[in-house]
Amino acid sequence: MKYIKLGGLRVSRIGLGAMGMSHGLTGAGTDDAESIRTIHRALDLGVTLIDTAEIYGPYINEELVGQALKGRRDQVVLATKFGLVDHGGAGAWNLNSTPDNIRTAVEGSLKRLGTDHIDLYYQHRVDPDTPIEETAGAVAELITEGKVRHFGLSEAGPDTIRRAHAVHPVTAVQSEYSLWTRGIEDRVLPVLRELGIGLVPFSPLGHGFLTGTVRNENDFAEGDFRRGNPRFTGENFQRNMAIADEVQAIAADAGATAAQVALAWLLAQGEDIAPIPGTKRVVRVEENTAADRLALTAGQLERLSNLPPAAGDTHPEAGLRMLER
């Protein structure tokens, strides 16, 4: 496994997103033992960046990750997120990035994760009711106290990133980025590179669509967020199949899997990018991490870069309102 730097934080070039082990996807929470084996296998393969959040569950994903990391905490750059749980009473899926809420959130996350510090602490979504300067200042205090090592933002726009960075250096910005979600390239990525901030793409496999294994929009169980995602429904689903099929064709040409090709394309976009493909299966983490060794040709990269945009928004309307892309 190769390693890069996100700001001043050294991480494996490919990380592991833990969300789907407990939350949001078909089969989540059904096999914690396999999920723990998956985390252990990732560590054995050289993966160091493990990503979770208090909202995943809520809370149960952090507990699972904490259980998996017992005895192996020093091998991991542990990332989690705050701001999508209002601990003042409104509860889950309510934005709150006030300093008091962050204080409550970090203590809960530290306990669930079984650690005395969080390596990378992200604001999960920008809170329009709390100035980002206040949020950044609160995280800066946690860094001074040793409870947090690095500050991150998720789905933040250029202005928010600049304002936060002026208060305390932002190490990484997490955003959806893949072959079919490329909006950050024009607005956000140039700002990150100007300021020396790393990029952590989540959903680098298009919520599984780019792997070529999603073939029917009715395959998702109740509670799987893809059931209501515009890209996975109706005519959009059928149009987007052409993108997945082209990735599969290039994979056949490269002697790799579609997932490996999608990840290799992302890795080719810069040495400041560390995608976090999510999985709850050992075989998939082995497949995904092998993308680190795949070198696509210039022609293959060009074909991938010229794929048509995906049909449909990345989120339903309520989710889109929380993004600053």
Image (cartoon, helix red, strand yellow):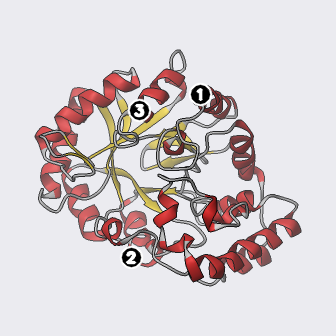
Is residue 280 or residue 146 the one in the foreground? 280
Residue 91 visible in image: yes
Q: Name the element at disc 1.
A: helix
Looking at the picture, how far across and down is residue 115, in whole percent?
38, 21
Identify the residue position indicated by label 3 in the image: 60
Tag 3 or tag 2, which sits nearer the N-term?
3
Mark 2 vs mark 1: in front: 1
Looking at the picture, how far across and down is residue 188, in whole percent?
39, 70
Q: Is residue 10 left or right of residue 156?
A: right
Q: Name the element at disc 2.
A: helix
**Number of callouts:** 3
Q: Name the element at disc 3.
A: helix
Tag 3 or tag 1, which sits nearer the N-term?
1
Looking at the picture, how far across and down is residue 141, in whole percent?
17, 36
Q: Is residue 265 left or right of residue 91?
A: right
Query: Residue most toward the top?
Result: 71
Confirm or deny contact between disc 2 and disc 1 (CB under 8 A): no
Q: Quadrant of the N terminus?
A: top right
Residue 187: give its label.
2
Q: Residue at x 44, y 78 (%)?
A: 186
Identify the residue position indicated by label 1 in the image: 36
| 184 vs 33: above or below | below
Mark 2 vs mark 3: in front: 3
Tag 1 or tag 2, which sits nearer the N-term?
1
| 182 vs 86: above or below | below
Binning the other alpha carbons within 10 Å of mark 3 as few (below 14), some (14 to 19) or many (20 upward) gives many
Q: Amino acid at mark 1?
A: Ile
Q: Residue at x 16, y 40 (%)?
A: 101
Q: Amino acid at mark 2?
A: Arg
Binning the other alpha carbons within 10 Å of mark 1 as few (below 14), some (14 to 19) or many (20 upward) gives many
Q: Is residue 266 left or right of residue 121?
A: right
